[in-house]
Amino acid sequence: MMKVENNVWLFMLCQALTMSIPSFVIFVGSIIGTTMAPDPSLATLPVAAFILGSALATLPVILSMRHFNRKRVFLFCTATAGVGCLLAIYALALQSFFVYVIAVVVLGVGLAAGQQYRFAAMESVSPEDAPRAASWVLVGGIGAAFLGPELAVRGEQLTSTAYQGSFALLFVVSVAVFLVLFFYSEAQKDESQDIVKGRPLFEILSQPVILVAVISGCAGFAIMSLVMTSTPLHMHFENHYSLVDTKWVIQSHIVAMFLPSFFVPWIIRRIGVQGLISLGIVALLIMVVVVFSDYTFINYWVSLVLLGIGWNFLFVGGTTLLPEGYRESERFKVQALNDFTIFGIQAVGALLAGWILSSLGWQTLLLISLPILGLLITTLIYWCKTKESVSAT
């Protein structure tokens, strides 16, 4: 049996493999949808259905971990993702848009447990090493950013039906994750003394540290989802950049989302989680300024890189802070609410991005980021003042 400390490396590998699912679906989902949808306006429905399936499954999946333990739920969801791949292959054989949408919803459900890898890794190490554990797991996202689209391209012509081979390769990835997870040794938590004393959810959420943790993650995902989803449309269709230029900007953004995880533990040691979140806010504010009115390629590239860095700092910062506000017996319900909220907001952002861009324009879409960041700044200041008053007493 492996030591639980080694779970960090195991989950970094699982992150790289599992998170290839969203990069795969986002890359190829609408392309397939365009060829199968009964109406062109429904072409993006598969991607939206995938995100919604993942968001809606997050709450029940995480809560079930308390009763069945993390390992069983991880394995079940990975198997569910495999079923989604097989169902997509069947849908492509039938050329059924309806079955295809169901398939990507199932894939979304299978992905839901993968968002918990970071918490499982943090629980496998000492509290002081938790930020490093969360950061290293997110590093796996760099591999996922390239693996998903590569699977789609490599498998496109493997069979006579386009993209059936792509889903077959994604099925192989799901099998690999399933096998890797068998080596996961779940950390044992003693909840027996605390289970009777579990506090009401309202009382837990009223803590400033929890508010900062949740709002930090929500702000990062809301802004990232709006801007990232809209950028290809604004670059390619409104400003006539090539698909190659647009792809390079998006790939650079995805790398920037995960690459800072190498340095985040060092940043936290130097300036703390509060400083990390503050840097994330600054990065996102500069992002808005850089691409607000000048649409050169370098402006798009710099702004999307800053968007990735800002998202990373806010997401890791919020993830690191969250355990400071709950007891062991409360961890699953707080983690479930946190992830359901932030991934639900990501889904809403992805659904609204196209409408906001077409109806209100690019600059308005960027300006929506400001009140979101303003809420986070206000909450962060409130938390800092609360800490100062507590230390003074």
Image (tube, helix red, strand yellow):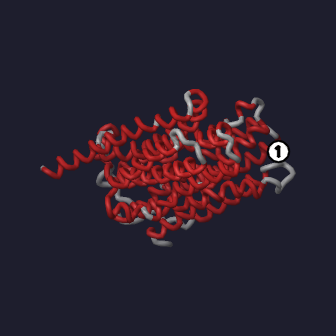
- Residue 135 seen from this side: yes
Instruction: Kindly indicate the quadrant of the structure image that contains residue 356.
Output: top right
Please tell me whether residue 125 is drawn above or below residue 61 in the rendered image: below
Amino acid carrying label 1: it is Ala
379 left or right, relative to 101: left
8 left or right, relative to 356: left
Residue 64 is situated, as x and y percent measured from the top left of the image, at 49, 47
Name the residue rendered at 60%, 61% in the picture: 143
Q: Quick one: SS at disc 1? A: helix
Please tell me whether residue 217 is drawn above or below residue 153 in the rendered image: above
Residue 40 is situated, as x and y percent measured from the top left of the image, at 74, 31
Which residue is tagged 1?
Answer: 93
Residue 387 is situated, as x and y percent measured from the top left of the image, at 22, 49
Q: Nearer the viewer, residue 83 or 162?
A: 162
Residue 66 is situated, as x and y percent measured from the top left of the image, at 44, 50
Q: Residue furthest right?
A: 160
Name the residue rendered at 53%, 51% in the picture: 302
- Residue 60 seen from this side: no
Name the residue rendered at 74%, 43% in the picture: 31
